[in-house]
Image: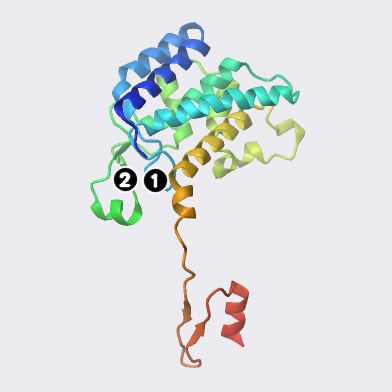
Amino acid sequence: MTLNENQILDNWNEFLGYIKKYITGDRKQQLLDFYSKYEERFALMPASHKPQYHNCFPGGYIEHVNRVIRGTIKVNQLWNEFETKSSHTEEEAVFSAINHDLGKFGSFEHEAALPNPSEWHVKNRGEIYTFNTQLDYMTVPDRSLWILSQLGIPVSKNEYLAIKLHDGLYDEANKPYLLSYSAETKLRTSLPYIVHQADLMAARVEFEREWLDKLNNTPVEEPKVTVKPTPQSKPVQVPENKDLKNIMDTFFN
């Protein structure tokens, strides 16, 4: 997947449009100033470092964020239709979506993702980009919140939780928040679930676009499994299309 210059520009203008439309007060101009200052970096950032994930190409980051914003608005509307208790504002929902992956930006001095100089890693592992080791290690949500704090942009409690927890249970660190069995310790806002669902949907759409046709059109050969002999056994050739139970039965019987 690649984007041309016009597509990248259209995506960037769409992104800025969400800030102008949904964000209010001083935060609107603070976000516009920050994103505009680093316009070229943001506009050309990938969303991930390898195609096996999603949107690993120049411009992939903003395209992904726009999709998450659109998804968040629609998922938020769906939750409202199902009569969830009002726990957050639409601005909080959009603000969280805009900045959910901000940590992928890196720092003010250093980009987080750099073109991989290793041809071997690009060819054999599909790692088109590599992490910039000049940066201290931080998780993407933690770096997102840290950047906002350095910019002096206030973040509400709901926004903080939504950005921090947007990866859902894919991040082990989120378990204390999302696997609570006590009413008192359960989340009191639905926003983290809404942003997570939008992010999950966006990433899945981007994966399907990149891979589904390729995978469905490529025949997959069943591998032949050969058990190497030991001093007490003879080589065993396992026929194709046997599941693990049959393989184990063949080996031990």
Q: Please, what is the three-letter code of the amino acid marked with disc 2?
A: Ile
Find disc 1 in the rendering and name its residue: 51
227 to the left or right of 34: right
Q: Toward the viewer: 80 or 109? A: 80
79 to the left or right of 92: right
For residue 119, above or below residue 69: below
The answer to which quarter of the image holds residue 112 is top left
Residue 70 lies, in percent from the top left, at 53, 25
- Looking at the image, the residue that sits furthest to the front is 217
Q: Is residue 189 visible?
A: no
Q: Which mark is residue 128?
A: 2
Q: Is residue 56 visible?
A: yes
220 to the left or right of 156: left
Tell me if label 2 and label 1 are in contact, CB under 8 Å: yes
Q: Please, what is the three-letter code of the amino acid marked with disc 1?
A: Pro
Callout 2 environment at 10 Å: few (<14), some (14 to 19), or many (20+)?
Answer: many
> Looking at the rendering, in which quadrant would you find the C terminus?
bottom right
Q: Toward the viewer: 204 or 107? A: 204
For residue 172, above or below residue 155: below
> Looking at the rendering, in which quadrant would you find the N terminus?
top left
Residue 193 lies, in percent from the top left, at 63, 32
163 to the left or right of 76: left
Residue 180 lies, in percent from the top left, at 70, 39
Element on which disc 2 rests? loop
Q: Toward the viewer: 49 or 138? A: 49
Q: Earlier in the sequence, mark 2 or mark 1?
A: 1
For residue 181, above or below residue 16: below
Element on which disc 1 rests? loop
- Residue drawn at x 49%, y 70% as measured from the top left: 222
- Residue drawn at x 27%, y 45% as measured from the top left: 116
- Residue drawn at x 40%, y 31% as measured from the top left: 61
